[in-house]
Image (cartoon, rainbow, N blue to C red):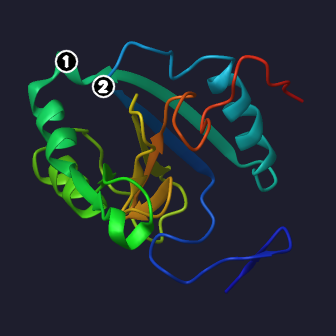
Amino acid sequence: GVDVGGVPVNEDPFGGYYERIAIHLYVIADHLSYDPFHNGFAKRLRKSLSRLRIGEQMIGLTTHNVMVQDDPELAMAVATSIKPIAKDAEKDGGPDVVTSYLDSASLYDHITHDHVVEWEPSIPGDSTVPRVVPVIVVSVDLEHPLLIDGSSVCKTVGGLVLAVQNSPESSIGPSVPSSSSSSS
């Protein structure tokens, strides 16, 4: 690939250098128990993104806070994408526990086929058109942490970035910064 500012550029259709990157952050919440954007989250994210720029590259961030209660299609997409996992007490040596995971393929299908989140994929190879990066964060308030496909808090699927935000009181601890966290 070509070198841009000392960084090799990939040859894959959505890799490479783009002069402008438009990040659309959709936080989809199914609760009112905590603010997904608390503690200056968007400001800290913008600051972190500015450090990733190459040269004069522009990175824009647009945030959307969506409540599932306000959108029946979105509520259905999230609800049908959360699948149960039963932990067997005999196998694990503890009590029977039913937890769940977010099925990335199911959520992706709902988002793209049902047009739950409107976005147009970027044009491969055209660096003058902004590279659109949709980031979908499912913010939940569950007793047990929700993981994507049972193993991760984030994953890329078909040009989308999917992530989960668990409650600060979740049994694995916060995946969102607590109000006592210091920011640098």
Is residue 38 found left or right of 3 in the rendered image? Answer: left
Q: Which residue is disc 1 drawn over?
A: 69
Residue 158 makes an appearance in the image: no
Which numbered disc covers residue 30?
2
Quadrant in the picture for the N terminus? bottom right
Which numbered disc covers residue 117?
none
Rendering quarter of residue 89: bottom left
Q: Is residue 96 placed above or below 181 in the rendered structure? A: below
Closest to the observer, 127 or 149: 149
Q: Is residue 94 placed above or below 9 in the rendered structure? A: above
The type of residue carrying mark 2 is Asp
The residue at the point 23 percent across, 53 percent down is 84
Residue 126 location (% of width, % of height): 48, 65
Closest to the observer, 1 or 172: 172
Residue 47 makes an appearance in the image: yes
Residue 37 location (% of width, % of height): 56, 20
Contact (Cβ within 8 Å) of mark 2 with mark 1: yes
For mark 1, does the 10 Å Cα neighbourhood hold few (<14), some (14 to 19), or many (20 or more) residues? few
Disc 2 to disc 1, how far (Cα)?
Answer: 7 Å
Is residue 144 found left or right of 3 in the rendered image? Answer: left
The residue at the point 46 percent across, 61 percent down is 155
Q: Is residue 177 placed above or below 105 in the rendered structure? A: above
For mark 2, does the 10 Å Cα neighbourhood hold few (<14), some (14 to 19), or many (20 or more) residues? some
Quadrant in the picture for the C terminus? top right
Residue 135 location (% of width, % of height): 45, 45
Marked residue nearer the N-terminal end (2 or 1)? 2
The residue at the point 46 percent across, 36 percent down is 25
The type of residue carrying mark 1 is Gln
Disc 1 is placed on an element classified as helix
